[in-house]
Image (cartoon, rainbow, N blue to C red):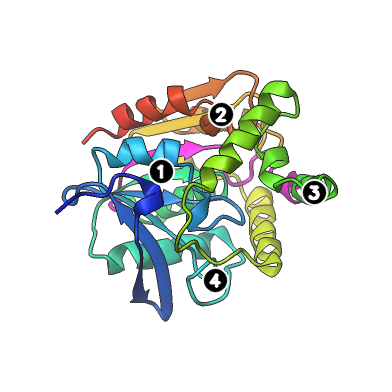
Amino acid sequence: MNVITAYKDAPTRTVDAGGVTFAYRELGPKGGVPVVFFVHLAGNLDNWDPRIVDPIAKQRHVITFDQRGVGASTGTVRDTVEAMADDAYTFVTALGFDTIDVFSFSLGGMVAQALVTKHPELVRKLVLTGTGPAGGKDMDKVAGVTYYDILRATLTRSDPKEFLFFNRDATGKLAGREFVQRLQERSANRDKPFALRGLQTQLKAIKRWGRSTPADLSTITQPTLIANGDNDRMVPSKLSTDLHHRIKGSELIIYPDSGHGGVFQFHEKFAPVAVEFLGQ
């Protein structure tokens, strides 16, 4: 049997758990500890950069999934990060896994932190990109930036991610266009679009996360890789440094002249680092 290692070819599957039908995709060789991907604000199965997923899937069993109420998953979008973490736990355990590695981006990184805090035995390794801790400074301003950039994108008929994830200089604009094009490589069986109401609910969850009591992340003892661009307007880059200081022994990479999507802009450098960090 041929092993699928290209994300664009991964079939969409479903699993029923906790009253929800979760949609997910899997690829890469089965066996061992899987790498579960936690997606960003208003993100569905189609929002993962294949230049990040595919290199990891060459060696590891990779799983991406739609949160409750997102894309093809049923139910209603959750309004707290902690509830999203509970759903992630329900999904992972429904697939029969008791140990996973986590690759997360943005809101997904917040969900990952909540998950590892609640269920430390579940997570072996943790990758946190473009994200920040509960109670992090200026985290509650994400909603304002998001609505502003959605408006800017609408006026120019662009994808909002080009504004939200990338700098608006020549390099950033090119990186944004290339990223959006890569997301279109999958032509068949694409996911259901994200609903505006779901975006509003997730933004409320992020605001609550930002205004909550600063998290005690000293309990996270898992090997942790943190990465971001140096000019993240959505989740300020200083919050990646904050995470690094709070999680003992963590590694931090900040890419120059890049924004929220720094790991996608620098995928040629970052993917091998992630592959090596996640190992076997």
Q: Position of residue 236 (x, y in %)?
A: 67, 34
> Magenta stretch?
121-144
The residue under label 3 is: 144
Instruction: Say few, some or many: other residues with alpha carbon within 10 Å of mark 3 (under 14 / 14 to 19 / 20 or more).
Output: few
The residue under label 1 is: 103
Q: Residue drawn at (79%, 51%), measured in percent from left and top?
A: 147
Camera-near label (4 vs 2) is: 2
Q: Position of residue 39 (x, y in %)?
A: 50, 51
Q: Residue drawn at (66%, 44%), measured in percent from left and top?
A: 161
**Which residue of the protein is positioned furthest toward the right in this rendering?**
155
Label 1–label 4 contact, CB within 8 A? no
| Residue 142 colored in magenta in the image | yes
Whether residue 65 is situated above or below residue 217 in the rendered picture: below
Camera-near label (2 vs 3) is: 2
- Given the image, on which type of amino acid does mark 3 rest? Gly
**Which residue of the protein is positioned furthest toward the front in this rendering?**
187
The residue under label 2 is: 265
At numbered mark 3, what does the secondary structure look like: helix, strand or loop?
helix
Judge left or right: residue 169 versus residue 174: right
Instruction: Say few, some or many: other residues with alpha carbon within 10 Å of mark 1 (under 14 / 14 to 19 / 20 or more).
Output: many
- Who comes first in sequence, dot 1 or dot 2? 1
- Who comes first in sequence, dot 2 or dot 3? 3
- Real-space CA distance between mark 4 and mark 2, rounded to the nearest whole angstrom: 29 Å
Q: Residue drawn at (41%, 43%), measured in percent from left and top?
A: 103
- Real-space CA distance between mark 3 and mark 1, rounded to the nearest whole angstrom: 26 Å
- Given the image, on which type of amino acid does mark 2 rest? Gln
- Real-space CA distance between mark 2 and mark 3, rounded to the nearest whole angstrom: 24 Å
Point out the image quarter for the C terminus: top left
- Given the image, on which type of amino acid does mark 1 rest? Phe
- Who comes first in sequence, dot 3 or dot 4? 4
At numbered mark 4, what does the secondary structure look like: helix, strand or loop?
loop
- Who comes first in sequence, dot 1 or dot 4? 4
